[in-house]
């Protein structure tokens, strides 16, 4: 059964140096507040996993906490590059970054395999790309029924999956709705699961199309209103487009970036940077 905790306590207890951590969320419900708490606590040597690493991972990489990134596509959505990510890959600043790049379909299937307790997943994909030459987590397999050659991708089982959701009840059951990505699969694949939520309610009201994670899936819940900012939470907040535009300028320069981290993360206990 999941426990309701303060965010700082949940992060300290669930995320450790050297862990494989997935911060998942698609367009909205991106768990920025939890990532900022990781930065405050200086949890390092992380392998980060995410289907679409954007600003949240630019911040963690720029803070020097990440040794490896497992991902598919990376960028500042609608704006451009992730400059801290790029600086780490091209110049090794603030530390060298190992990358393991996949397609979206490959990453989704890796989570599904992990959630299913299987060692790998099979899909049609990767043909015509050089991704297979750059990773040891993609191979080929012959279909035992047709002989067709298919791609096989190794399962993903993060030590910790972190997501943001709209609601949890007092027993630790979680519900999220709106655009959903692979949060459910990433949670089911992980050893430990931390969910930050907009609010804790006495009882969940089930919604058509909503994703419910029962309390036995979730290790800890933390109530963090605004915990997805600058992304949004459907029904609770809107996307801060100005922040994403501003991030391009903030992240281009190392000194400007480190100053922003000092001012908006390290010196504040707010749930998210405003």
Image: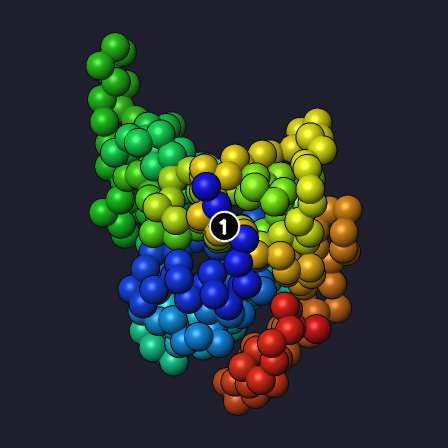
Horizontal arrangement in the rendering, residue 112 relative to residue 176 (left or right):
left
Query: Is residue 108 in sight in this rendering?
Result: no
Q: Quadrant of residue 204?
A: top right
Query: Is residue 36 in sight in this rendering?
Result: yes
Q: Quadrant of residue 110?
A: top left
* The one of 191 and 156 positioned closer to us in this rendering: 191
Tell me the element at label 1.
Answer: strand
Residue 257: % across, % down: 55, 82
**Residue at 63% across / 68% down in the picture?**
271
Name the colouring of the figure: rainbow
**Residue at 74% across / 63% down in the picture?**
240
Q: Is residue 64 above or below residue 156?
A: below
Q: How many marks?
A: 1
**Residue at 22% across / 22% down in the picture?**
142
Horizontal arrangement in the rendering, residue 244 relative to residue 222 (left or right):
right
Quadrant of the image for the C terminus?
Answer: bottom right
Residue 1: % across, % down: 46, 41
Horizontal arrangement in the rendering, residue 105 relative to residue 166 (left or right):
left
Residue 243: % across, % down: 70, 69
Q: Is residue 267 above or below residue 190?
A: below
Q: Is residue 8 above or below residue 104?
A: below
Q: Going by the picture, which residue comes out furthest to the top?
A: 145
Q: Quadrant of residue 17?
A: bottom left
* The one of 5 and 121 positioned closer to us in this rendering: 5
**Residue at 38% across / 34% down in the picture?**
115
Q: Which residue is mark 1?
A: 3
């Amino acid at each position: 059964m999941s426990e309701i905790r303060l965010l700082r306590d949940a992060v300290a207890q669930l995320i450790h140096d050297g862990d494989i951590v997935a911060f998942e969320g698609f367009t909205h419900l991106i768990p920025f507040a939890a990532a900022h708490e990781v930065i405050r606590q200086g949890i390092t040597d992380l392998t980060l996993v995410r289907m679409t690493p954007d600003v949240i991972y630019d911040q963690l990489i720029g803070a020097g906490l990440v040794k490896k990134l497992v991902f598919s596509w990376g960028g500042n959505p609608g704006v451009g590059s992730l400059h801290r990510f790029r600086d780490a890959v091209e110049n090794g600043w603030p530390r060298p970054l190992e990358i393991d790049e996949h397609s979206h379909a490959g990453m989704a299937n890796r989570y599904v395999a992990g959630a299913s307790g299987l060692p790998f997943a099979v899909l049609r994909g990767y043909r015509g790309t050089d991704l297979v030459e750059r990773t040891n987590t993609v191979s080929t397999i012959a279909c035992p029924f047709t002989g067709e050659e298919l791609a096989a991708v190794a399962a993903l089982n993060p030590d910790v999956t972190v997501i943001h959701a709209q609601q949890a009840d007092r027993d630790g059951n979680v519900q999220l709705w709106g655009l959903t990505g692979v949060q459910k699969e990433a949670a089911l694949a992980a050893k430990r699961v931390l969910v930050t939520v907009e609010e804790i309610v006495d009882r969940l009201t089930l919604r058509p199309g909503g994703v419910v994670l029962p309390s036995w899936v979730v290790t800890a819940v933390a109530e963090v209103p605004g915990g997805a900012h600058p992304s949004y939470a459907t029904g609770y907040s809107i996307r801060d487009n100005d922040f994403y535009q501003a991030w391009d300028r903030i992240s281009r320069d190392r000194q400007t970036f480190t100053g922003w981290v000092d001012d908006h993360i390290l010196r504040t206990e707010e749930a998210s940077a405003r």
